[in-house]
Image (spheres, grey):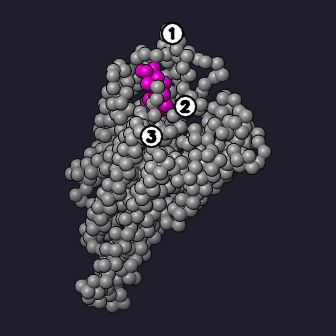
Amino acid sequence: MGSGGGYGRISKKWVGFVTAIWVQSIAGNNYTFANYSGALKTVMQYDQTQLNNLGVAKDVGKSFGLVAGFLADYMPTWAILLIGALEGLVGYGVQYLVVSQRVARLPFWQMGLALGLGGNSTTWMNTAVLVTCMRNFPHSRGTVTGMLKGYIGLSTAIFTQLCTALFTSEASAFLLLLTFLPAIICFVAIAFLGEVSPSCSHEEDAEEQSNFTILNTISMGLAFYLLTFTLIANFFPISPFGNKLFAQVLLLFLLAPLAVPFKLFFNKFTKDHSPARLKVDETTTPLLLGGKDHGQQGGEPNQQQFLDNMENGHEESLVGTEEQCLVMDDVPILTHQHLDDPTSLDNQQQPERARKTGVPALGEDHTLLDALQTIDFWLLFFSFLCGVGTGITAINNLGQIGEAQGYSDVSLFISLISIWGFFGRIGAGAISEYYVRKAAVPRPVWMALSQVFLLVGYILFAVAAPGSLYIGSIVVGICYGVHISITVPTASELFGLKHFGIVYNFLILNLPLGSFLFSGLLAGWLYDREAAKSPQVGYEHLGMVQLMASKELNSSSSMGWASSSDPQTCTGAHCFFSVFMVMAGMCAVGFVLNIILMLRIRPLYQSLYGPNGTAQRKKSPQLTRM
């Protein structure tokens, strides 16, 4: 085996991660319904109630992520991506044919099915990308999650701006792009994204952190670029040429992550062709690769010896040099077909408690049913609900909140929540990863801290002081992003990566559940009660359909649950005072739950990362012998 083998594994991993970023950058296509809903309503001659029901069908499609999560444990990455791409092709393709009037108007149930397929397609993309990258980078789970979740937070703005600036704002052309662009990106990812063995040396660990620093810098630059453009566009008109220039620079930002695999290729090429390296290869290769004379007689360790040392915790005797990592390139990673193989390491070395009770210990691989039997899972689930459930309520009702406080246009606040949500996601991922490595700090600490700031943000919304909506939007965006970014790696550390897909998708059921409980029931009931006490000012009741802050919220009056008659409306600080005070109380509950969870799992983090962090490198759960 030549030295190119080590690079083959590393380059595949990083090129795959770049394609994962691209997938997440267009996975927000599900949040662009407002861009073509008006044309769909006109062509199909729908009333508002029918259009609203199509919006419900789209959101219901997003709620079936459990199917993708379950199959992700048994199917390869390319198959999951392929299903998502095909669903998107069919779902958005049907909508394109209808809106462009290339086919006759379809029955309502068929249109609902088409929107449901389009909505469900993103769950397959998200699951494939997140599960695969978490398994490829198990030592950087927080950073990986923060970055990928950050890009999907910006995906609506990225996708819409690119399509509008570079192509056209015509609804049929927009749907045509929705049909093919995500599918094309998925097919690119199919070619490069797949599970590979994780880092196997201190040198590679350090290189991973350096590469993630580069990618984080690019990501932050992209977010600041979008924030700057949003603020400028909010106060000054942008010419068509300015829009195209903006989109071209945006494309460069999206291509910029390729700098990492290019850097690796250049470094490897330079190192392999240096005179010193050629001389070393001539004298050491037979020993390193266990040749005929040395491989069986105490020379460098072969693959079996490498795995035996890894299993016994003696990595320091093997791990640390690039050449020794080459051994891992011939070691097959744990595949889905072998997850339940009774001869695998995971099944051979189950602790005594797991063999007796059938319930894995915390930190081992859990099935969803195993996880549901633990107190820690429900602490994580309900603390997540207190954060994202209340956050969705603020996001979905931002239009009404702004109008109740006298703002005629709330697009700036929507953009603030979206972009600062990105900063919350990527920042929480990087910060939690730093402190878990440095001091084995349990990740729920950061969720508890964000609950405190979220409580303050809701109080600012409640009192409706001058300027409070600006500050509150930023706080809610950041804290919402923190919860999304922290919960995912925490779940993988508590319940393992083997069945992570379905565990993750069960946790994110909190999004529709939180929207229904806090937005649909709580906020709706309390708002109507206040509106009944107030003089009617006649503005239209805005909706509560969307689960994310996106451009779709800008036209929430056409997407909401409005009836044909004008409902009661409310103006003034009192309209949402009770809503936000109740949600502030829920944040206090979430804070307590996170503290309890943190205290319960602190011993696990000390076991995983060492009492003082990752000074001593822990073995990866992916190094499993078949």
Q: Earlier in the sequence, mark 2 or mark 3?
A: 3
Indicate yes or no whether the magenta region holds residue 405.
yes
Foreground of the two, 607 or 121: 121
Crowd class of label 1 (few under 14; some 14 to 19; many from 20; radius 10 Å):
few
Q: Which mark is residue 16?
A: none
Counting from the top left corner in percent of width and height, residue 126 is at 51, 51
Q: Name the residue beneath numbered marker 2.
A: 556
Q: Amino acid at mark 1?
A: Pro
The main secondary structure of the magenta stretch is helix
Quadrant where the N terminus is found in the figure: bottom left
In the image, residue 106 sits, relative to residue 545, either above or below, namely below
Q: CA distance from mark 1 to mark 2?
A: 23 Å
Q: Give the structural element (helix, strand or loop) at label 2.
A: helix
Q: In this view of the protein, can residue 100 be seen by the observer?
A: yes
Q: Which residue is mark 3?
A: 237
Tell me the residue that label 1 is attached to: 535
The three-letter amino acid code for the residue at tag 2 is Ser
